[in-house]
Structures are given as structure tokens and as C-alpha cells.
Image (cartoon, rainbow, N blue to C red):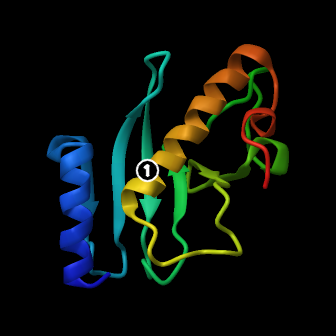
Amino acid sequence: MTPTRKDLEVSILNRTLGRRNYKLSEPCGPNAELTAAVMTDPGNTYGLIIKLEGFPEVCPSIYVKGELKNWKGRPMSSTDASMHCYGYENGNTKLCYGWTSSWNPQVSLLYLYMRGKIWLECYEMHLVTGNPIDYYLPHA
């Protein structure tokens, strides 16, 4: 990420999330990542990690801190298209959020954060109903 792009992204994040609600580590370096707390509508808080290696040219990976379980209490440890999940990586749940083949480098970090939040809202509904995340967030 260039310094100019970093400044733009930080400005957007500060306006919408507030400076204390996220951390942008090594924004112009090879281990760049955005971490943020996400509170869902039911009031549960999750840690979101967005790996930014090569951003904005390369599509980032989005993770939820920790190993999430499905509504039956079973680990979401493998790729499951109906759950928009790629399983676990380094102890975190890797999300499928819809940009695998058509990545656009103009996408903002705030948009990626919102995609993670939407996934988490659908995950919370899954925990209540047992419906897969795809029921709420169908593939296009």
C-alpha cells in the first residue's frame, strides 16, 4: 500500500470506526494487516483480521480471531461453501466474502470491514436457526 493510499484509508477508518476501534499494522510493509473489534447486533464481539499483503492490488484475506463452531458446536474446520468459510488458518476462521475472482483494487478497507461484519451477522443468525450462512448471504 502506498503512503498516499494509507493516508486515505486511515482517514476513512477514523471517520467511521474511530481511532480506538481498529489497528493498522505495517500498512506499507509485507506483513500489513488491519485488526478491529466487531460487535454484532445481538451484542457479541469478535476480532476481525484483514491480511493486507499486496493490498490494494491483491485481494485480502479476512479472518475471525479464533476457531468458530457451527450451531451444533462442531468446528468449522474445513472449506464449506454453504457456510462461506475456508476453515481454520493459524487458529483463526478464514472467511469467504465474495471477492475470489473479481477483485477490484479500488475497494476500501472499510468495505472489507463491513463484509466481515455482515458475515458475522449471518453467522449469529446461523447459530440461532441452524440455517447455513448461504441462506442469508447467497452466492451471486
> Measured along the vertical axis of the image, is residue 106 above or below residue 139?
below
Q: Secondary structure at mark 1?
A: helix
Quarter of the image where one finds residue 50: bottom left
| Residue 62 screen position, x and y as percent | 53, 56
- Observer-nearest residue: 86 or 3? 3
Please state the horizontal and vertical placement of residue 19, each as a whole percent of the image. 16, 47
Label 1 crowd bin: few (<14), some (14–19), many (20+), radius 10 Å: many
Which residue lies under the disc numbered 1? 113
User: Is 83 left, or right, of 17 in this rendering?
Assistant: right
The quarter of the image holding the N terminus is bottom left
- The quadrant of the image that shows the C terminus is bottom right
When the figure is inspected, residue 50 is found, relative to residue 103, above or below; the finding is above
Q: Nearer the viewer, residue 122 or 25?
A: 122
Residue under the point 18% across and 60% down: 11
Residue located at (62% from left, 24% from top): 124
Image point (74%, 22%), residue name:
73
Position in image of residue 111 (x %, y %): 45, 55
Image vertical order of residue 136 relative to residue 23, above or below: above
What count of labels does the image hold?
Answer: 1
Q: Please indicate whether residue 128 sits to the left or right of residue 2 in the image.
A: right
**Vertical comparison of 83 with 61: above or below:** above
Residue 134 in which image quadrant: top right
Identify residue type, mark 1: Tyr
